[in-house]
Image (cartoon, helix red, strand yellow):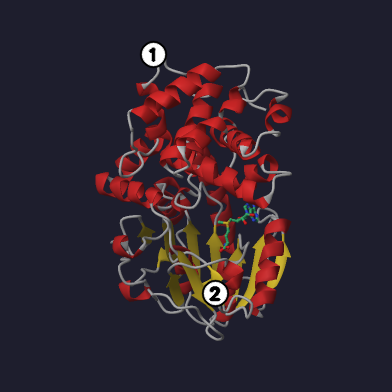
Amino acid sequence: MGPCLRRGDEDRVTETTGVPARLAALKLLDAVLRQGLPLEAALERAGAGLAPRDRGLAHAIAAAVIRWLPDLDELIDSATRNRLADDAKARMALRIAIAQALVLKTPGHAAISTVLPLVDGGPRKLVHGVFGTLMRKNVALPDRPTLPYATLYRWQKNWGDVMLAAAEHAIADQPPMDIALKGDGPVPEGVSLAPNHMRLGDHGPVTEIPGFAEGSWWVQDLAAQIPARLLGLNGGHVLDLCAAPGGKTLQLASAGWNVTAVDASDSRLARLRENLERTGLEAEVITADLLDWKPSAPADAVLLDAPCSATGIFRRHPDVLHRVRPKVIAEMAAVQAKLLARAARWVKPGGRLVYATCSLEPEEGEDQLAAFLMAHGGFRLDPVRADELPAGVTPSANGTVRTLPTMLADQGRLDGFFVARLVRV
Ligand SMILES: C[S@@+](CC[C@H](N)C(=O)[O-])C[C@H]1O[C@@H](n2cnc3c(N)ncnc32)[C@H](O)[C@@H]1O
């Protein structure tokens, strides 16, 4: 438990209707903001024992706070004489109450009455007073969330103001759901932005969408569909490295490749196997640490979808905006360099190597590639052509692909990815 949670909190608040979900939201925020854990990973523990509805509510409250944190804090600071510490329980409780009132549109009295038990025996009066002051003033949040300072500074330096504005819009908007099509079976209606792609409008639960049970598609962001597309159709044997939960494995298998999918995580590979079973596609699946494992022979192609800071998927996982710091980026870049050097050894002469990360940090993309090319004279870039990409996504001048939130702005945007295709000369 963090400084904002005390023993006994649980017993005191579980009696009151609606409060357990707020306590779980408080635990989630502590896990993300203080302990640096991913929101989804923290949900398992913080939401344990909660009814699905309360668990969903806790997640929605925590995600709303995380999306709007700098703006919520600005409101709180405008109404307090002495600035509350970042991890003070009163600040956490106020963030939860204000996010409910202004983002989730919970009636003010419900937003505050379910939060006050979290500060019982503590700064209850202060929380009540600050919340009341702000509501009486009819305060509002800005049109789009302000990025946390560290992320704002980094992205402004790397991508400029236009990207920053697009990123802020992207945080505020609900991202669309993209699916990749196997090529047969029922397909729901939507807008297709690339071959075998569909962007869905309003939809209910994923499992009830036409074609899910038949396995005729899987959920995969349009940007995440690019790396496997760049290997084209059946070119022989492909090593899909860091494969789980398997979006790219499914694409490669359905394009006719003979796929060996390798990943270190058993639980993520279990999802990959479920996906193969549902879609009726085939791949050899291997659980192994790629820093130890090696294939029995080089392959015609290798796809390395390397582990990364994941800042490119901030729309669905806004916690990365707060958790990812230069240290995390440097650590991930070091892992990627090792994996990339190993993957390169397993490409046949004349074969292709695709390197991808869902990161908006050049250290995990452009810089990583430059360092690789300096150290591996046997590889050259195989430039990607515009006609290989979804309309509205253009390759960079050197033929690599960098997707940014500025792209497809009128069609729901796409995740941030870096993709490079290389050939072994
Ligand atoms: C970006 S995700 C892969 C997503 C996957 N390619 C897809 O399309 O669904 C990165 C993966 O790398 C795996 N990973 C990280 N380090 C690894 C290692 N040393 N060896 C094998 N897999 C690793 C993680 O378990 C994780 O599943």
Q: Position of residue 24 (x, y in %)?
A: 63, 38
Element on which disc 2 rests? helix
Mark 1 lies on residue: 81
Is any part of residue 10 visible from this angle? yes
Indicate which quadrant contains ligand 1: bottom right
Q: Nearer the viewer, residue 32 or 109?
A: 109
Q: Earlier in the sequence, mark 1 or mark 2?
A: 1
Identify which amino acid the numbered label 2 is placed on.
Answer: Gln
Image label count: 2
- Which residue is pictured at 44% across the width and 38% down the height? 101
Reply above or below: 46 against 336.
Answer: above
Q: Position of residue 12 (x, y in %)?
A: 70, 27
Q: Position of residue 49 (x, y in %)?
A: 74, 44
Q: On residue 134, which mark appears?
A: none
Mark 2 lies on residue: 251
The N terminus - image quarter: top right
Q: Say whether residue 317 is left or right of residue 35.
A: left
Q: Nearer the viewer, residue 19 or 89?
A: 19
Quarter of the figure with residue 302: bottom right
* Neighbours of disc 1 within 10 Å: few (<14), some (14-19), many (20+): few
Identify which amino acid the numbered label 1 is placed on.
Answer: Arg
Is any part of residue 96 visible from this angle? no
Q: Nearer the viewer, mark 1 or mark 2?
A: 1
- Which residue is pictured at 67% across the width and 78% down the height? 282
Q: Say whether residue 112 is left or right of residue 8.
A: left
Quarter of the figure with residue 240: bottom right
Q: Nearer the viewer, residue 290 or 419?
A: 419
Element on which disc 1 rests? loop
Reply above or below: 90 against 369.
Answer: above
